[in-house]
Amino acid sequence: MPSALTQSVYSSNLTLAVYLGKLSVAWMGENSGRNIWYSAFNGTTWTSQHEAPHKARGNPALAVYSGKLYLSLVVLSGLQGLLRDL
């Protein structure tokens, strides 16, 4: 990962998707208590890192569907959470 992403990344928890010409990435932070982070790369710079509002039990996943970017994760309560338009 580029050094611009400051949250340590578990390499097995990384997910990527291309959306609107940018490379989007989401990951579980190494020492962040199961927090999920996400950012996007436009070929030159990374956007600020943002934290998803839910803690996760497993790996995040990104997908593009119907022109929108979705982040999927299993939240600690056991329900499937979907966040759209990252």
Image: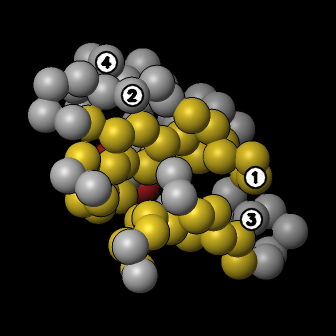
- Residue 13 visible, this angle: yes
Q: Are marks 4 and 1 in contact (CB under 8 Å)?
A: no
Callout 1 secondary element: strand
Mark 4 or 2, nearer chain start: 4
- Amino acid carrying label 4: it is Ala
Give the Cα separation between the discs numbered 3 and 4.
Answer: 27 Å
Callout 3 secondary element: loop
Give the Cα separation between the discs numbered 4 and 1.
Answer: 23 Å
Colour basis: secondary structure
Q: Which residue is mark 4?
A: 4
Q: Which residue is mark 3?
A: 75
Q: Position of residue 45 (x, y in %)?
A: 23, 23
Give the Cα separation between the discs numbered 1 and 3.
Answer: 6 Å
Q: Are marks 1 and 3 in contact (CB under 8 Å)?
A: yes
Mark 1 or 3, nearer chain start: 1
Camera-side mark, 4 or 2: 2
Q: Which residue is mark 2?
A: 47
Callout 4 secondary element: loop
Q: Are marks 4 and 2 in contact (CB under 8 Å)?
A: no
Q: Which residue is mark 1?
A: 54
Residue at (31, 27) in percent of width and height: 46
- Amino acid carrying label 1: it is His
